[in-house]
Amino acid sequence: MKEKAFKRSVGPMYGSLMVCALAAAGPAFAEDASTQASPDNATSLGTVTVSASLNQTLAEDMPLHTTVITQDDIKNSTSQTLDQLLRTVPGFNFTGVPAAISDPTGQQTKMRGLGNAKVLVLLDGIPIIDPFYLTTQFHKVALADVDHIEVIRGGTSSLWGNMAVAGMVNIVTKRPSDNTGVVTVGAGNHGTASLSWSQNFKVSDALALNLAVNQYRTDGYITTPSPYRWKFPRQRANSARDTNIELSAYFRLTHSLNGFLRLGNHEQDQHIGYSYGRNLQKNPDGALGLDQRFDKDSSLSLRAWAQNVHFTKYNGATCYYQLAGGCLNSNAKDQVVSNDVVEYYSQYGDLHYRERGSSLTYSRFFNAFFNSLQVGIDYRHLSAKDSESFFATPGSPEIPQVLNATGYGRGEQTFGGAFVQAKVSPLDVLQLTFSGRYDSWRNTDQVHTLTKASTGVVSGGTLPSSSKSAFNPGLGLHYDATDTWSFRGATYKAFRAPGFNNTTRSYGVGPTTVANPDLGPETMTGWEVGSDYRNDAVSLGATYFRYRIKDMIATYRITSAMGAPQPVLSLCSSSAAAPNLTNCGGSANYYTNDQNGESHGVELDGSWRIAPSLKLGAYFTYTHTYLTSEASSITTPLHVQLVGIPEKTGSLDATWNPTDRITMYGQMFYAGPMYLDETTTHGTNYGQGGNVIYNASASYALNDNLDLSASMTNIFGKKYSENAYAVTQPWSRTLSMPRTFFVSATVKY
């Protein structure tokens, strides 16, 4: 990619309760949805009930722009992981770097131009969001276990609370109905391999079990462009191994009382760039559900879930150790290396955090006018402890680890909420959905300290407790103009509460990023309108949306103690009489809510079955997202498209079945021009042009029990990136996925 300068003159285990609500009802409806989304009808949205709607709404009757990714879609995709599958779904703004080889603390599930922690991702109604960093736990999901995926765009905090700001994803897994098993084995370049084994045990008509074991591993690739690898001596490719073991039991206690129990253990082991660069997560979890049906029209659902996470993190680094100049990290390209390269880790973190949640949801279906009513309450408790050690550059090759300071943080968050949803049809062709949710959350037991190794002086300490509350309403409409043509619309309010990473964890020295216990929630008000046309051969959809986001969480740099917030002074100053920033290396970054923004755009999608054996698909999105106000110390320009988000994306694809046993798929994916740096040079925005990526796959059913498949991503090896970085530091640019191929075999027995 050749850099270009674009010049322009400068003139909400998460959502708190939302998760709980969906967790309460999602699995209850998941069975209905999964049994309907069979391969024979996977392309007919009218046959798929969206479990995340809570009121059994068909996908084609949803008031929000909704996409159902079927088993056929998953099989045809060239993606091996969930994040890369979602990347090519209209409305998402994913980076091209696979989650498996990127740091889990920075993975962002972005939708409709909004940033981190604004998309709720659920697995059978249970959140798979990291309780500390609010990132998606992609490593928990193996595509081989997925039945279908529901993608709902738009603010849904009126049902599911925190983080359902831009939209939500509900992944519905397969359910056992017999004693069959499935084994899928695959391998590809970059040392990539996967193994998935799922075995069903139908013990009786009242009890069925499933044991699923999955491992995905990859040696990855070096994400630094080759012209700048001199900057990182001994740099290796990022590699990962994700391992999941899960046992599920589905039981019927009486003719009207059903339940499930799920126990799992998940581990992600990443090696990031160097011998001492490692992210290791160990994550046991469990969920329990009971569904009591009183009659054909009313039911009560109870859910409880828990997860523990132990995360050990080493940030690897290297330097050229020169006798005359010491340990040089910022070497010149042509510098002569006179001594060995020294590898060390600049930071070590040991994090323990956990989530406990429960919910209760009552659902009642009435008549043609008053369709349904759902009422729910839920509770969720999070706790975290974070110990960090910071190391200076080595003083000699023989002593690579030089302790500079240690940090400690802890905190607890308690969420509670209640919601109600009602759907009415004043006319046969008109459905109105009213929803509202009240949430409260409390931050307690907050502590963060910093201890300098040289002096033993401890700064920081206990932080005051705080509490917040919010009410989020929503209104949706769906109108059938004809049997094939419909209109939809919705307006909503949504929020995202700050996480532990914002309120509890202070990290780094010179500068130190200081937690802000007084952060408030980000809030969003928005609306959208859309129209759909569907017949037996053609499906067309168009959506326009507009968001206004207030109190966005950002960081700004503090270089003087004068006027610095008290948490910064408590942690960074070595003197109460003469405040300074000495303990933090002379400067600090501090979280703030002083930022507002807007996002609006258009989403067009369609499909056309030209013949029984040939289907075409396409989509186009336009997303304009920008800041409207910010603190004076933040330098991102206002009213300019945010970095890393192309205004235009699109896709063309074709699926061809020349015989009943052969499926061939091709896709042309377009990521339009985007800005990558807007702050280095005042008034100048740096970016890259658009890129077209070609993907293809083919599968062959050798017989009823054996399927073979092959796929290739980025067929022509396009080199491009989508991450924001300073152009004065081109070595910080991160390359998106290069050409990859993968072959697999699936055996059913």
Image (cartoon, rainbow, N blue to C red):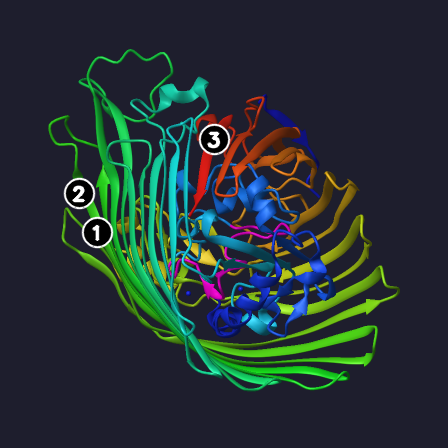
At x 42%, y 48%, the residue is: 749
Mark 2 secondary-structure assignment: strand
303 lies left or right of 372: left
Query: Start and end of the magenta stretch?
Result: 109-132
Q: Earlier in the sequence, mark 3 or mark 1?
A: 1
What's the residue type where badge 3 is placed?
Answer: Phe
What's the residue type where badge 1 is placed?
Answer: Thr
Mark 3 secondary-structure assignment: strand
Question: Magenta stretch mostly in which secondary structure?
Answer: loop
Disc 1: which residue: 406
At x 60%, y 31%, the residue is: 695
Picture quadrant where residue 3 is located: top right
Tell me, yes or no, whether the two marked residues, 2 and 3, touch with CB atoms within 8 Å. no
Q: Earlier in the sequence, mark 2 or mark 3?
A: 2
Tell me, yes or no, whether the two marked residues, 1 and 2, touch with CB atoms within 8 Å. yes
Picture quadrant where residue 184 is located: top left
Please identify, in this view, whether the residue under mark 2 or under mark 3 is nearer the observer. Answer: 3
> What mark, if any, has residue 403 been given in the picture?
2
Give the x, y percent position of residue 545. 73, 57
